[in-house]
Image (tube, rainbow, N blue to C red):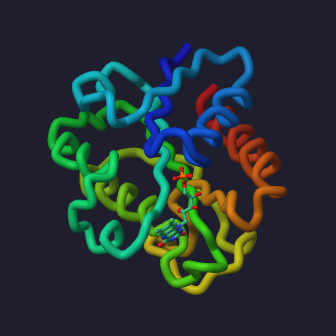
Amino acid sequence: MKKIGIFYGPTGGSTEKVATMIKEEFGDVDVTMYPISDHTATFINHFEVVIFGCSTLGSETWNGKSTKSDWDLFRPEFDKLAVSGKIFALYGTGNHLTYPRNFVDSMGILGKILLEKDATIIGQCPTSDYEFTESEAVINGEFIGLPIDEDFEASKTTERVKNWVIGLKKILF
Ligand SMILES: Cc1cc2nc3c(=O)[nH]c(=O)nc-3n(C[C@H](O)[C@H](O)[C@H](O)COP(=O)(O)O)c2cc1C
């Protein structure tokens, strides 16, 4: 059985809530959740399947300026992250009504860092299921991972997570 880790940040809000939902949806499969703020690339390198979860919090995040967010602090670790033989998947929390031009941008920023490293990424999602204007997370016409809007579409989260994990399991097992 592949060793699966969900590495997420920030903690205590919807990004953590969605990590828990993803873990539960995997059922009997051994999936462990870790706040990204507590871990290094060296630790993540022990996992065969890595799920990264992030929220998008404003223009400093989109511009890549340091906001001291969990993921900004982790950023130098990407140089040490091993991608060969591993599978990555991403989810991102955001708000499609207040931030339609930057919907889940951080997920795209993370995805592009991984793509530059030639990482294998699964779990892309069609844009047709979402209303938004622009997003860094749309790469080659689809979301690079699973967008979740707990602010204005919380009623859709369970179904979205469920379908996404079904798709991941089909590829992984
Ligand atoms: C200051 C601020 C800026 C935000 N900027 C964006 C944004 O640019 N794009 C987006 O999709 N959501 C944005 N959001 C919405 C958050 O990503 C969303 O509420 C998310 O669920 C927060 O996750 P958390 O509860 O784990 O912190 C912003 C929220 C705040 C408070």
**158 or 162: nearer the eye?**
158
Depicted 137 relative to depicted 43: above or below = below
**35 or 158: nearer the eye?**
35
Q: Position of residue 87 (x, y in %)?
A: 44, 36
| Image-based side of 112 in relation to 78, left or right | right
Seen at 59% across and 86% down, the residue is 133
| Image-based side of 20 in relation to 62, left or right | right
Q: Position of residue 125 (x, y in %)?
A: 63, 60
**123 or 134: nearer the eye?**
134
Depicted 114 relative to depicted 52: above or below = below
Q: Is residue 111 visible?
A: yes
- Image quarter where the N terminus lies is top right
- Answer with the quarter of the image where residue 126 lies: bottom right
Seen at 63% across and 74% down, the residue is 96
The residue sitting at the front extreme is 12
Q: Position of residue 129 (x, y in %)?
A: 75, 69
